[in-house]
């Protein structure tokens, strides 16, 4: 029986790349996201090594249904990748949208909480569970115009650190991956409300920003180390980005 990995936010970007990579690593991958059509296409691409489950991480009922679907597959649930998240807007704090901030907190923080709670019993029962949460360098470095996202990612990393302490002595590893500048099809576009020009400007002149496959590689590497090895936090940036505010651009 294959080990089961659950990946949230799997309909695009890092989540989809991670699902493909974990399937190659031998996992049966449960891909979870809101867009069922995208998931079905991904499962068709991966083949028998994947199962699609439509899931909205902001809904308690939807997450409960995900947990039920996962357990009915019958195999040991050994890996959860909390990848669902996102950013909205670049308003300063003084004029920040409460609606955007609430959405970012619900998806990035409470979504991680809901899915982790729902799948933790199965992960622990496997005897060799791993929880990987995809955070951001925004989790520890504030920047102008990023208040809501920075606050949410700070909260998410606090959740992860607390969980690791609380699970000490139990057979579940807790890992955090914090990417810097990653160019995907949707993240920046969604942040700028669909404005492709503004999204493209984020990466203008940056030679080889990270891509989704780079982060999938990091996730797979940490998740496939011997079970006694816990990579607490892995920070990964493109070589052009020395720090949050230090980006080399070839213009």
Image: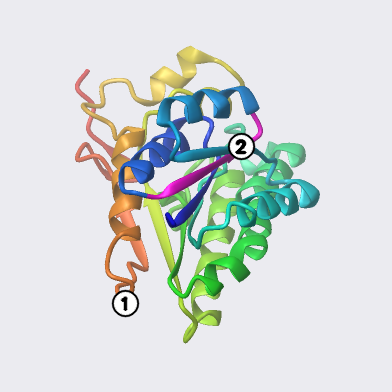
The tag earlier along the polypeptide, 1 or 2, is: 2
> Which one is nearer the viewer's eye here, 5 or 16?
5
Q: Is residue 19 left or right of residue 21?
A: right
Q: In the rendered structure, find residue 119 and report the number of the disc placed on it.
A: none
| Distance Cα–Cα, label 1 vs label 2 | 30 Å
Q: In the rendered structure, find residue 33 and report the number of the disc placed on it.
A: 2
Q: Position of residue 183 (x, y in %)?
A: 37, 29
Q: Residues within 10 Å of mark 1 (few under 14, many from 20)?
A: few
Q: Is residue 14 left or right of residue 242?
A: right
Main SS, magenta residues = strand
Q: Position of residue 224 (x, y in %)?
A: 30, 59
Splitting the image into 4 quarters, where does residue 180 fall?
top left
Q: Quadrant of the C terminus?
A: top left
Query: Pointer 1: what residue?
Result: 228
> Which one is nearer the viewer's eye here, 86 or 218?
218
**In this picture, is 160 found above or below 67?**
below
Q: Which residues are magenta?
A: 27-35
Q: Is residue 66 visible?
A: yes
Name the residue at 62% across, 45% down.
148
Q: Position of residue 172 (x, y in %)?
A: 47, 73
Disc 2 secondary structure class: strand
Identify the residue at the far front of this view. 1
Q: Is residue 48 left or right of residue 69?
A: left
Task: Report if residue 29 lies within the magenta region.
Answer: yes
Q: Is residue 145 visible?
A: no
């Amino acid at each position: 029986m294959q080990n089961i990995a659950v990946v949230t936010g799997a309909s695009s970007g890092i989540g989809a790349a991670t699902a493909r990579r974990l399937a190659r690593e031998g996992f049966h991958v449960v891909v979870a996201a809101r867009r069922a059509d995208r998931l079905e296409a991904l499962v068709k691409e991966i083949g028998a090594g994947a199962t699609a489950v439509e899931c909205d991480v902001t809904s308690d009922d939807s997450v409960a249904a995900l947990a039920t679907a996962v357990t009915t597959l019958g195999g040991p649930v050994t890996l959860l990748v909390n990848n669902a998240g996102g950013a909205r807007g670049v308003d300063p704090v003084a004029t920040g949208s409460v609606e955007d901030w609430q959405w970012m907190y619900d998806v990035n923080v409470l979504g991680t909480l809901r899915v982790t709670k729902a799948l933790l019993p199965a992960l622990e029962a496997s005897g060799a569970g791993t929880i990987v949460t995809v955070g951001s360098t925004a989790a520890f470095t504030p920047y102008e115009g990023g208040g809501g996202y920075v606050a949410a990612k700070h909260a998410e990393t606090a959740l992860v650190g607390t969980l690791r302490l609380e699970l000490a002595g139990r057979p579940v590893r807790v890992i955090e991956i914090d990417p810097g500048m990653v160019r995907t099809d949707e993240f920046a576009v969604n942040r700028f409300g669909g404005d492709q020009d503004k999204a493209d400007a984020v990466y203008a002149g940056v030679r080889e920003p990270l891509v989704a496959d780079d982060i999938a590689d990091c996730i797979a590497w940490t998740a496939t180390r011997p079970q006694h090895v816990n990579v607490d936090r892995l920070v990964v940036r493109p070589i052009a980005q020395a720090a949050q505010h230090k980006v080399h651009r070839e213009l």
